[in-house]
Amino acid sequence: MQARRRSIRFAALGIASFAVAIVATLPASLIVRNADWRSGVGGTVWNGEVGVAGGSRIEWRFAPLRSLTSLGFAVDWTATGPDTDLGGQAILSPGGVRIDRASGSADTSLLEAVQPGLPFTCDAAVQVDLPRLSTVAGSAMAEGRIAIDPGSCATRPGGVATATPAMLLTAEHVGRETRIRLVPEGQRRRTLVDATLGDDATLRLTMTGDGAATLPFAGVPAGAAISTGL
């Protein structure tokens, strides 16, 4: 009986090793869809990279142990390029994405990769400190802050650029929801955008009068409330 159990363990280990070997050699293009923001893709699913229009590059390395314990595809990732030096951890699952310990600097051109459907484009540098961001329904949440340097944004396609001030985006998780606020840097009481992210991955945001005047390229009138799923 003991010999049989040992044989089963060795067989299971062999199957797992074979599966890992297959994953290690699959091309990275299988998990990164073709899109306007993508300027190229290389490597494998285990260790790959994708170029972002604007000059940045996102690289990842598969984390097998974290993948087993989290029941998802776990990676360590970095983003580098003009005004960009960002890194963290991520877990991809059928229910969404969880990002941990994201920190560093980035150019807003990375928004193309995160939210390619935005009706505007921006040119500004940001400082990121996000201990946790999850879009997984049932456990969606955010915690941290993003400091945005002065820059400019314009509507698509070819809209007139609007100068934007230094701003601060904060996220605080309380209970079953996350409170998110966008304010001008140094003016915490002057809210531009007020939002909540529920643990069901529903984002509800309201544009204030100050926000509509400061961010006209967003195309959202003052007082308008928008609800969307992540």
Image (tube, rainbow, N blue to C red):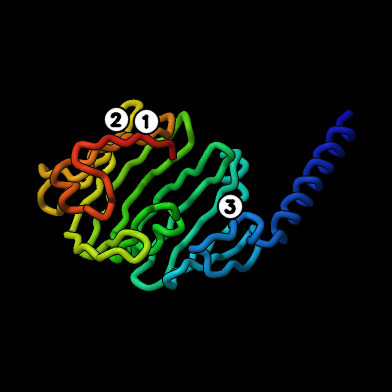
Q: In which quadrant of the rendered image does the C terminus lie?
A: top left
Whole-Å distance between the Cαs marked 1 and 2?
10 Å
Q: Nearer the viewer, mark 1 or mark 3?
A: 1
Q: Tell me if 2 is positioned left or right of 136 in this view.
A: right
What amino acid is labelled 1 in the image? Gly
Residue type indicated by callout 2: Val
Which amino acid type is shown beneath numbered disc 3?
Ala
Circle 3 — which element?
loop
For discs 2 and 3, the disc positioned in front in the rendered view: 2
Examine the rendering and report whether any part of residue 179 can be seen: no
Sequence-first tag of 2 and 3: 3
User: Closer to the N terminus: mark 1 or mark 2?
Assistant: 2
Residue of label 2: 174
Which residue is rendered at x = 72% and y = 52% of the image?
Answer: 20
The span from disc 2 to disc 3 (Cα, nearest Å) is: 30 Å
Dot label at residue 63: 3
Q: Secondary structure at mark 2?
A: strand
Q: Is residue 169 above or below residue 71?
A: below
Contact, mark 2 vs mark 3 (Cβ under 8 Å):
no
Q: Would you name the residue on which mark 1 appears?
A: 198
For marks 1 and 3, the one nearer the N-term is 3
Instruction: Count residues near mark 2 (Cα–Cα under 10 Å), then give few for <14, some for 14-19, many for 20+.
Output: few
